[in-house]
Amino acid sequence: MSTTTTQRPEQRTTPAGKTGRLDLGEGRRAALLLSPTFLVLALVVLYPLLSAFHQSLFGSQSGLDADGFVVEGDVFVGLGNYVQIFAGTDAARFYNALWNTTFFTFTTVTLEVIIGIAMAVAMNRAFRGRALLRASILVPWAIPTAVSGLLWRWMFQADGIVNTLTNQQVLWTAEGFAAQAAVIVAEVWKTAPFIGLLVLAGMQIIPEEVYEAAKLDGANAWRQFIAITLPLVRPALLVAVLFRLLDSLRMFDLPFVLIGPRKSSVETLSILAWDESNQLQYGTASAFSIILLLYVAVIAYVFITILGADVVGEKKPKVVRARRRAQDPPAHDAPSSEPTQTKVTR
Amino acid sequence: MKQRSHDRRGVLSAALVTVGVLALTSCASGTSAPAASSDAAELTGRGPITYVSSPDASGAAQQSIDAWNAEHPDELVDWIELPLDADQQRQQMVQNAQVKGEAYTVLNLDVVWTSEFAANRWITALPEDALPLDAEIPATVEAARYRDTLYAAPYYTDAALLYSRTDLMQAAGVTAPPQTWAELQKACDAVLALPEAADMSCYAGQFDKNEGLTVNFSEAVNSAGGSLFNADGEPTVDTPEALTALNFLVDGFESGMIPEAAITFQEEQGRQSFLDGNLVFLRNWPYVYASFSATDGSSAVQDKFGTSPIPGETGPGVSTLGGRNIAISSYAENKATALDFIAFFTGQEQQGDRLAVSSRAPVFSEFFADDAVTERLPYLPDLLTSLEKAQPRPKVVQYGATTAAIQDAIYPALTGDTSPEEALADLQKALVGIAAE
């Protein structure tokens, strides 16, 4: 890792950059013009976030008085909720949920990518009824998750169609690996079309000439796919995968509806947070949410830095700058622990 | 360039925060409120009120409300309809109570929530003389009390019934429905020996990991002479009686008396299985009666089944009490109107009128002996026997945590992942922990 990490651009020495032209007055006006946006963001993003964090520092302490009435109050427990989660009596439940979340995310996203790309390749060909196929492939994606959870629940029932067709007696909706498999099947069914369509969109902007040139060079279909299609749809694919990663890390409704709450083999972090808030343990529930938030953020950050997904639409200038910098030796050292995207461009 | 790189990082982190915040569901809701004082004497104020309840597909409740509104133009009742899912109903009512909302006046509570709502002072104590409690089935009135104070009026009630395939029992020479678990086993052995019952299973209840499991386990323990909690509210599940009860279920799964698939059964799956003719005996609520007796060809058991009280260890079993109570929110206005409305709504006259359209069991014992009523709902006499012995589910304040602990302990015992002894010891420990919180 450290060998591929290049240093951050030296920032103080280049006042002649494009942004350097902004003088103070312009900066103020820009800030003023952006302030409604920031205000809205602060209200809908920052406030709930801070409020949830604040809540996670409190524990509800309740007891009954002599007449049987609840005496309760929120007690400041500092990071006590977090300590309880990581090392308390119920820590095993948390680690199990964390593992389930991670397991579901990586298995479903991997399968979705493979199936989604296959779908895109199939749909990218010209054939009769292509438009209809493209529209129909979106149907699973368009069905609300709770509804598709119910549909799959009926199919996976003990006397459901899955058992009838396979002539097995598997208890999909009980506990264990069968339950996890049921969730994975339903999730992949639902979201592979999403990746398929985004990849298809990426494929359609690949110029036909590239393929013609490859054909002239004698590349077979597989070689064309590996050498042309995959690299060129990569930006679209990475964004699609990132969205799916974030989405499935928050997975709640499908296991909840398909298998049920409190089933340890499919309990995810979101279900755990829901369960706590349902028991009126808002402090712990908030702590779970904050942990999930951090986990999602870390995974997203790692994904973006390692694979260089172009989420913010700023990759191109960055690449150019990075190349230019690579040619000119840096003026002096600016230590940084943060790997930049230069690594990716090489 | 400096600014640019900052911008980029800013946008990136903003994007991360935004997606992350989506992970924060509704957990940031308000801080808990200190208890409000409530007293039966405070029921004052007249004017429009709201009735907060799950939907009623039969239209019976709406009929009662319309009747009230016609007589009381100045004290109109407006129905606030909540989702069908009980957890969501409870959550919305709790949230309303936590912000001390005035929007909800009269609450339709599941019997098991009554203690929690009363202990948190979210509902108001009711004067006993304003309601015809003497004419109502004692178990239903008991379920509306918390620590000897009345907090709600019984609305409708529910208890378990044992549905049996009387045609097969007759063919196998079994004359009476089983009253004990041993008789149940014996009847099954006889029936399943019949060639026409070769593919059938003996018995099922609700054993999926949800509220149904708590109900079935609690019924088994009570039917074996035990109880989940003693009179002082201390958990008593690590007892020989509870072990007998749990063993009945665990052995049932092991021996195949209960089909393996029943571990995934909630009320509906069991109903379907019996309806298709796959079960000899089924424990379920009265609501499935209508679908079993359907004459449109959808039922394979029409005219071939009967009902009886559920069996127990040494004699007839003890059912868990279901049903609904009606209470007044502590934070509402016009409580005097609310009390009058509750007396009207849960009164005998309205319950009688509703019987014409709804199959929900009334709380007045008189109806159970009324021939006109029992002709339409023939299971009522059996239900009354069941109700006379019925026990409420644990009357604990933290019911949510309690039922979760029961399901967490009993479900793995039924699937064979833990031994019954271990499960009960764990459950006892968990329930003591919840009580100490």
Image: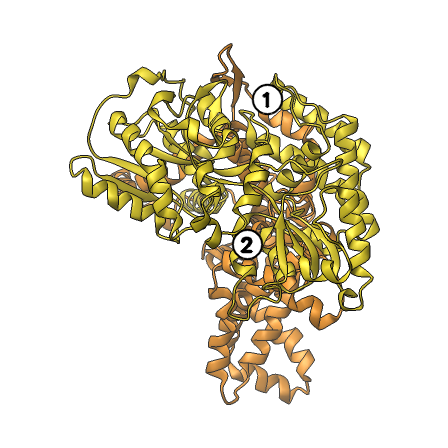
- Which residue sits at x=79%, y=27%? B240
Q: Which residue is mark 2?
A: B288
Judging depth in this view, the residue of A239 and B307 nearest the camera is B307
Q: Which chain is orange?
A: A
Q: CA distance from mark 1 to mark 2?
A: 48 Å
Would you place residue B51 above or below residue A260 in this image? above
Would you place residue B194 above or below residue B395 in this image? below
Judging depth in this view, the residue of B148 and B381 nearest the camera is B381
Q: Quadrant of residue A233?
A: bottom right
The answer to whether residue A13 is visible is: no
Q: Residues within 10 Å of mark 2 (few under 14, many from 20)?
A: some
Q: Secondary structure at mark 2?
A: helix
Marks 1/2 same chain: no
Q: Chain of mark 2?
A: B
In the picture, the quarter occupied by the C terminus of chain B is: top right
Name the side, left or right, on which B249 lies relative to A291. Answer: right
- Inspect the image, locate mark 2, and give the three-letter code of the amino acid beneath it: Val
- Which residue sits at x=62%, y=35%? B404
Q: Which residue is mark 1?
A: A80
- Inspect the image, locate mark 1, and give the three-letter code of the amino acid beneath it: Gly
Which color has been applied to chain B in this rendered view? yellow
Marker disc for residue B187:
none
